[in-house]
Image: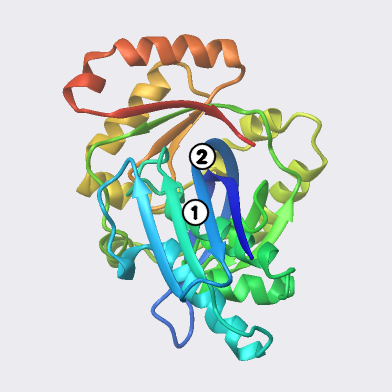
């Protein structure tokens, strides 16, 4: 039997990202993050032929070729089939072709590759009749990439550990956004190393527990965000701006054009601005699009909403 699955793989932003130290016996940092799904997305197609000779082919349209050892979709499929083989419930492994039409920029900190990988995991799970529990799928995703578990849930989630401990909350949907992606990316290890050399994490997590509860109960999330902007902090933003000063330039461009607040997502280099309504966002988008800085520095500009 052969089936084709076509899905949208959405990006995310980090409304906050706090570094809480290092995880024991690990190279990972312990993080406390609020991730929010947004409407910017890639298109993912997964073709599965149960009778074909087993192979996994992953190709991207709209970006430079990615070798298998760096392609998260390929890794996701390998991890999935490894877990499936341990079950001993399949006669043979299939031929799989994964095609990703890229709209989400890479090296942006908005989870494009991780979202694509999660989409592959969910498509394969559907094909095999959902053989894994939520916890088992989460483990497959976590072994693929730190942000991948979030995309099994989407919406809004508090993510802890290195990203694998996911707690869904009420989605903060329909917040108007502008995203600016500077040309250069940021090295995530370099960014964390710079943070470690200059900062000792001191985080009052109870403040974020109260913030999370307030968001979950709010009729208007934008009001809660407006009243607690001091909590909307990305600890990696300062070191990232040292490596890629265009991140600061993009953030200031959003603030100067009326963003309620603007911040870098993940380890960068994409910056997002949250606006009070779509009319103000659209006016700002028009102005920023015409700003000479955008063309001179070859920034990519996106208009979308939280999902």
Neighbourhood count class around disc 1 (C-alpha, 10 Å): few under 14, some 14–19, many 20 upward: many
Question: In the rendering, at what x and y percent does residue 195 appear?
Answer: 32, 61
Neighbourhood count class around disc 2 (C-alpha, 10 Å): few under 14, some 14–19, many 20 upward: many
* Residue under the point 50% across and 43% down: 43
Q: Which mark is residue 7?
A: none
Q: Is residue 256 above or below residue 221?
A: above
Closest to the observer, 197 or 283 = 283
Question: In the rendering, at what x and y percent does residue 4 appear?
Answer: 59, 53
Circles 2 and 1: CB distance less than 8 Å? no
Question: Disc 2 on helix, strand or loop?
Answer: strand
> How many numbered discs sit on the rendered protein?
2
Closest to the observer, 112 or 20 = 112
Q: What residue would you read off at disc 2?
A: 41
Answer whether residue 180 is visible to the viewer in this image.
yes
How far is mark 2 from mark 1, CA to CA? 9 Å
Q: Is residue 72 above or below residue 303?
A: below
Q: Quadrant of the N terminus?
A: bottom right
Q: Is residue 251 above or below residue 296?
A: below
Question: In the rendering, at what x and y percent does residue 275 appear?
Answer: 55, 22
Q: Which mark is residue 116?
A: 1
Q: Is residue 103 left or right of residue 31?
A: left
Corner quadrant of residue 63: top left
Look at the image and name its color scheme.
rainbow
Q: Is residue 126 left or right of residue 229?
A: right
Question: Disc 1 on helix, strand or loop?
Answer: helix
Question: In the rendering, at what x and y percent does residue 67 appear?
Answer: 27, 64
């Amino acid at each position: 039997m052969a089936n084709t699955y076509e899905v949208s793989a959405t990006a995310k932003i980090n409304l906050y990202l706090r570094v809480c130290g290092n995880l024991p016996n690990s190279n990972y940092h312990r993080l406390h993050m609020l991730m929010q799904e947004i409407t910017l997305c890639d298109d993912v197609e997964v073709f599965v032929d149960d009778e074909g000779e087993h192979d996994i082919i992953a190709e991207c349209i709209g970006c430079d070729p990615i070798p298998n050892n760096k392609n998260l979709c390929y890794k996701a499929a390998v991890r999935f089939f490894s877990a499936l083989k341990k079950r001993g419930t399949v006669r043979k492994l299939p031929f799989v072709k994964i095609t990703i039409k890229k709209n989400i920029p890479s090296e942006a900190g908005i989870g494009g590759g991780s979202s694509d990988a999660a989409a592959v995991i969910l498509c394969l799970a559907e094909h095999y009749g959902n053989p894994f529990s939520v916890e088992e799928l989460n483990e497959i995703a976590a072994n693929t990439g730190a942000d991948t578990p979030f995309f099994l849930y989407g919406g809004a989630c508090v993510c802890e550990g290195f990203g694998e401990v996911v707690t869904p909350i009420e989605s903060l949907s329909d917040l108007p956004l502008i995203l600016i992606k500077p040309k250069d990316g940021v090295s995530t290890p370099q960014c964390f190393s710079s943070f470690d050399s200059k900062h000792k994490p001191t985080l009052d997590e109870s403040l974020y527990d109260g913030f999370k509860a307030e968001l979950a109960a709010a009729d208007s999330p934008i009001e809660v965000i407006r009243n607690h902007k001091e909590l909307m902090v990305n600890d990696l933003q300062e070191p990232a701006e040292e490596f890629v000063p265009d991140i600061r330039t993009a953030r200031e461009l959003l603030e100067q054009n009326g963003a309620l607040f603007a911040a870098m997502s993940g380890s960068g280099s994409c910056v997002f601005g949250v606006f009070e309504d779509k009319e103000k966002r659209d006016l700002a988008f028009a102005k920023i699009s015409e700003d000479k800085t955008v063309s001179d520095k070859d920034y990519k500009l996106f208009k979308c909403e939280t999902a």
